[in-house]
Image: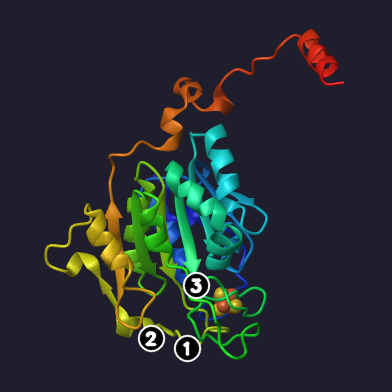
Amino acid sequence: MATLQDFAVDVRPTWCPGCGDYGIWNALKRAFVQAGFDPEDIMMVTGVGCGSKMNDYMRIGGLHTLHGRSLAVATGFLLANTGRKVITVHGDGDGYGEGGNHFLHTVRRNMGFVDLVENNQVYGLTRGQVSPTSRAGFRSSTSPSGALDRPINPLALALSQGATFVARGLSLDLPQLQYLITEALGHRGYALIDVLQVCVSYNRAMSYDWYRERAYKVEEEEGYDSSDQAVAMAKALEYPGDGRIPTGILYRTEDVPAYEEGIAALSAGPLVEQPLRTRPIEDYEELVREHM
Ligand code: SF4
């Protein structure tokens, strides 16, 4: 069985001291160990952003993609190789902004991978522009008078499109985040974990204390039923808002097949392990003639 040391690399992260990415980094490695994965079992697909450097800092399979394209590339990778555990890790701008369209379609397909979104509510790598999850009134280099747009609610959006696993974590709560990732890794279909992450350089108002004062765990509420979609939606709508922030697994069902389960060609095993079937060269020549 793999240990934390097996996931270690001799590369130091370049994140700012105090960045929430450190907590996410640690929780990911611990969850991989807890879930019983070896480094070669994992394929982490990332986009562009501070936290998208995540796969540089651990010994696993990694793919860096274009900005906002993590989910599309992860979909392609998973369909080619269902033998690997796929996880996407990217920021809120990458996931809900540039990749917003991919987000909707990945949810409705119920692709069988984990999607961890580092939601610091600002573009950090490019020095603090307003992002799709920034609060209205948020002052940034691109919204000096305060953002006019209202923020996206990713959990409510995912639920409205039929998401089968919807969770929120905090970068400052490592045990809870480890638990959420471990559970998501065992989920049958698409598992969204929106992680509220502290950006100490460009979103100082939403500090560690700011989150501590507002966050609570839904599982600590008496009678909370994470299999009830309507209850989950009501929780999801609490934040963004001015009140408390629900965290934990808001909704989960294992009753919906993952997209790849419905693909007949995969019943014989991962595509990459199936023999390559080639057709005679005359077939291709005929095809070329048809289109000339
Ligand atoms: Fe982290 Fe923000 Fe620094 Fe990026 S800019 S490394 S998100 S603290």
The residue tagged 2 is 210
Is residue 277 shown to the viewer in this render? Answer: yes
Task: Find out whether the residues at labels 2 and 1 contact each other: C-beta distance under 8 Å.
Answer: yes
- The mark that comes first in sequence, 3 or 2, is 3
Q: How is the image coloured?
A: rainbow
Q: Position of residue 158 (x, y in %)?
A: 40, 56
Determine which quarter of the picture holds residue 143.
bottom right
For the image, the number of numbered tags is: 3
Residue at label 1? 205
Q: CA distance from mark 3 to mark 2?
A: 16 Å
Q: Secondary structure at mark 2?
A: helix
Q: Return the mark for residue 133.
A: 3
Asked which secondary structure carries label 1, the reply is: loop
Q: The N terminus appears in which quarter of the rendering?
A: top left
Ligand 1 quadrant in view: bottom right
Q: Is residue 190 above or below residue 48?
A: above
Q: Amino acid at mark 3?
A: Thr
**Residue 164 versus residue 284 in the image, above or below:** below
> Of discs 3 and 2, which sits in the foreground?
3
277 horizontally vs 60: left or right: right
Q: Is mark 3 within 8 Å of ligand 1?
A: no
* Contact between labelled residues 1 and 3, with CB atoms less than 8 Å apart: no
**Which amino acid type is marked by label 1?**
Ala
Where's residue 189, x and y in %? 39, 43
Q: Does residue 112 appear in this view?
A: no
Which residue corresponds to the image point at 83% horizontal and 13% vertical from the top-left?
A: 285
Quadrant that contains the C terminus: top right
Q: Residue furthest bottom?
A: 145
The residue sitting at 41% across, 59% down in the picture is: 157
Please, what secondary structure does the residue beneath circle 3 have? loop
